[in-house]
């Protein structure tokens, strides 16, 4: 039964689960704090932390918002635990997943026998019946605990964390949007085979093999080698409105004779959220030298009021000063004039580097975020060098 109205706020560390299916939960932590009567909360995956935009407790119901993702938890105190639901607006409508949390920490995973380790680089293939998608896994291991991420041509899978007992590997993440769980069995040949689950979607088969040396760098194409301009000599053009309804075009005086970085994004996209602070810092550093940046946001819905609200939240969350324009919906993106100028476009984020004549000089597909470690540092440097090249 529900807790009485006078129940104190559920502060402390909670070990939480989202359960698209009862047998395959995705686990993470939520840390709730109270200061001067005001609640705050943090979402934790391994060593990665992200603040909830708001936290509220009315004596019976806990509400934790991730407003920038149009998502929230609503849960009640049931006995010693919390029970409720996670909801988020998606292209298909409102997604809901059962949620629960407890205060008792799970037992530490035992180290696998024989010093077996999954640490290192892995070549992964996902086969969904329609085709095969390649990923690169980067894993670290301490005892039986495993952390790392997987890279695709459109970005990384966030801060994966889980366990390896010498036979079975489990990796999972909830980043505010994605509910991912990989389960794999170690085969006699040293490869892994198993199933990948994403929220309520049917499981997808995956296989993985260890990569050594140059194979780790070449299993996937480089981010600058995926998308190209259909007409490299033609200037890239755009014309959309910002969140206040003001039209902004590539022909505006503010862009004339200046190099421009154009970022395709969505406020719903965790990789785009990882890229935003990098673009913000590039803009602060290089705008005085003549750089302009503009982002083209593709949102899930046709609800313009909702889309403008989400873009404004995005601007505020990251302190962004460059324009973010509403370019359309994800459903219609492939036919958008912004994207039909490109060849090989796959998704978000995609970042264009335009010279002073607005011709495309470079295009980077995806974004290697903080969970990728050294690759994140490397990509930030490459983006900085690309900007300096445009300014020269």
Image (cartoon, rainbow, N blue to C red):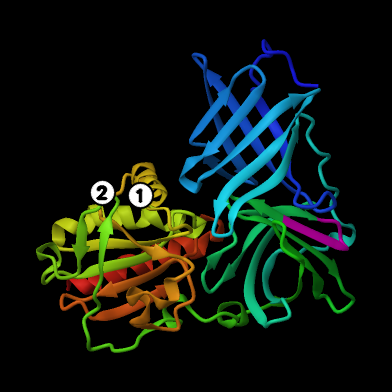
- Measured from the top left, where is residue 58 in percent x and y? 60, 19
| 336 lies left or right of 186 | left
**Which numbered disc flags the more N-terminal residue, 2 or 1?**
2
Q: Secondary structure at mark 2?
A: loop
Label 2: few (<14), some (14–19) or many (≥20) C-alpha neighbours in 10 Å: few
Q: Does 296 sit above or below residue 93?
A: below
- In what element is the residue under mark 1? helix
Residue 204: mark: none
Q: Could you tell me residue 276's position as x and y percent?
A: 38, 55
Image location of residue 110, percent across then percent down: 86, 48
Question: Which residue does the numbered mark 2 point to in the structure image?
Answer: 244
Say which quadrant the N terminus sits in: top right
Q: Is residue 21 above or below residue 249?
A: above
**The one of 338 and 104 positioned closer to us in this rendering:** 338
Magenta stretch bounds = 164-171
Q: Say which residue appears at 11% left-offset and 72% top-offset.
A: 257
Residue of label 1:
308
């Amino acid at each position: 039964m529900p807790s009485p109205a006078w129940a104190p706020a559920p502060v402390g560390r909670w070990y939480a689960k989202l359960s698209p299916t009862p047998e395959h939960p995705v686990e993470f932590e939520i840390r709730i704090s109270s200061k001067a009567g005001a609640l705050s909360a943090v979402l934790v995956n391994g060593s990665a932390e992200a603040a909830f935009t708001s936290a509220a407790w009315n004596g019976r119901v806990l509400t934790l918002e991730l407003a920038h993702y149009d998502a929230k938890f609503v849960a009640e105190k049931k006995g010693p635990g919390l029970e409720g639901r996670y909801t988020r607006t998606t292209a298909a409508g409102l997604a809901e997943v059962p949620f629960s949390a407890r205060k008792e920490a799970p037992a530490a995973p035992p180290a696998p026998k024989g010093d077996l380790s999954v640490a290192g680089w892995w070549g992964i293939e996902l086969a969904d019946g329609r085709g095969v998608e390649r990923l690169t896994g980067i894993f670290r291991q301490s005892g039986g605990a495993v952390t790392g991420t997987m890279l695709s041509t459109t970005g990384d899978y966030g801060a994966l964390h889980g366990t390896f007992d010498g036979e079975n590997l489990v990796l999972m993440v909830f980043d505010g949007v994605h509910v991912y769980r990989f389960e794999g069995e170690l085969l006699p040949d040293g490869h892994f085979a198993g199933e990948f689950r994403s929220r309520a979607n049917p499981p997808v088969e995956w296989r993985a093999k260890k990569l050594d040396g140059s194979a780790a760098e070449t299993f996937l194409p480089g981010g600058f080698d995926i998308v190209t301009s259909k007409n490299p000599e033609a200037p890239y053009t755009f014309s959309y409105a910002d969140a206040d309804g003001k039209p902004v075009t590539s022909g505006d005086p503010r862009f004339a004779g200046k190099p421009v970085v154009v970022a395709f994004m969505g406020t719903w996209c965790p990789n785009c959220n990882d890229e935003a602070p990098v673009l913000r810092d590039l803009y602060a550093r290089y705008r005085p030298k003549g750089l302009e940046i503009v982002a083209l946001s593709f949102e899930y819905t046709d609800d313009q009021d909702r889309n403008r609200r989400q873009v404004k939240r995005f601007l505020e969350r990251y302190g962004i000063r460059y324009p973010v324009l509403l370019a359309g919906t994800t459903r219609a993106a492939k036919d958008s004039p912004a994207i039909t100028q490109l060849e090989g476009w796959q998704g978000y984020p995609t970042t264009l580097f335009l010279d002073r004549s607005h011709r495309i000089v470079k295009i980077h597909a995806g974004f290697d975020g903080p969970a990728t470690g050294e690759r994140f540092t490397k990509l930030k440097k490459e983006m900085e060098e690309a900007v300096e090249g445009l300014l020269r």
